[in-house]
Amino acid sequence: LAELEGSTTILTDHERGASVPRHFGPGNIGAWRDRRLWKRYVRHFYPMADLCQTLTTEDATALREATGLPVEVRSPMIHIADTSLDPSTTDPVMLFFGDYAHHPNPESARALARDVLPLVRREIPDAELWLAGPRAGESVKELGELPGVRFLGFVDDLTDVRAKSRCLAAPVYSGFGVRSKSMLARILARIQAGMKPSTQNMMIALANWPHGVIGSKPS
């Protein structure tokens, strides 16, 4: 932002200014230090932008309180496919997608592959987990070697992959704000299984949606 001085800059915050990894080293060593450094980062860099914006009014309020800056709201836009998808015609495939350079996503992929899928396969032996998305490290790619896990990597068009999935999972343990994958699940009439961070700002809607499941444990 400092190098862009003289240009109009807009900073879009997806995490309410509070992005903290769930685990930070063995035994969560360093979590306090990382939290302090992140707050310093927000205080230093966010004021450099001409405008800060979030995706919801709740996030804007939280960010205003945290920074004292004026914050606008830009509502998210999700493309709606021309045709709806029918989950009853799909195989028992659980889909997770995201950019794996964003720390909550590798964390979620590992939890799904190692903790959630084995429980699902006890009841549905042929169930599979598909992992899609760019910039995956070896720790994510290696999950494809586990029983029932298929690592797809970057997929140019997710339409076909989503059409073959019955459930969109979002076990996001850390971070805040809006998860576009959660909104996509609703638009596509997919079953959504998620933890509270992945359903932030959608709790009331999901409570009245028969295809949404919110939990705090793999089971």
Image (tube, rainbow, N blue to C red):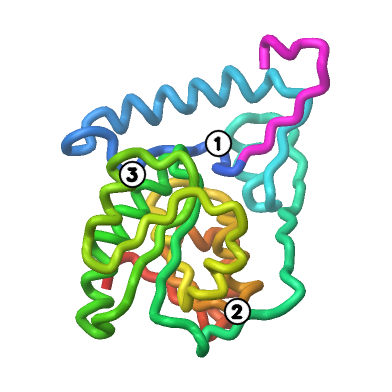
Secondary structure of the residue carrying numbered label 3: loop
Residue ranking furthest to the left: 27
Q: How far apart are the alpha carbons under marks 3 and 1?
A: 15 Å
| Residue 24 falls within the magenta-colored stretch | no
Identify residue type, mark 3: Arg
Residue 204 can be seen in this image: no
| Residue 7 falls within the magenta-colored stretch | yes
Identify residue type, mark 2: Ala
Name the disc covering residue 142, or none.
none
Left or right of 81? Residue 201 is: left
Q: Looking at the image, is mark 3 or mark 1 earlier in the sequence?
A: 1
| Mark 2 closeness class: few <14, some 14–19, many ≥20 residues within 10 Å | some
Secondary structure of the residue carrying numbered label 1: loop
Residue ranking furthest to the bottom: 88
Q: Quadrant of residue 215?
A: bottom left
In the picture of the structure, the residue carrying the numbered disc 2 is 189
Quarter of the rendering occupied by the N terminus: top right
Question: Residue at left 68%, top 44%?
Answer: 54
The image shows residue 187 at horizontal and vertical percentages of: 66, 72
Q: How far apart are the alpha carbons under marks 2 and 1?
A: 31 Å
In the picture of the structure, the residue carrying the numbered disc 1 is 17
The image shows residue 193 at horizontal and vertical percentages of: 43, 71
Residue 40 can be seen in this image: yes
The image shows residue 183 at horizontal and vertical percentages of: 61, 65
Quarter of the rendering occupied by the C terminus: bottom left
In the image shown, does 160 or 170 lie closer to the viewer? 160
In the picture of the structure, the residue carrying the numbered disc 3 is 22
Q: Which residues are magenta?
A: 1-13
Identify residue type, mark 1: Gly
Q: Looking at the image, is mark 2 or mark 3 earlier in the sequence?
A: 3
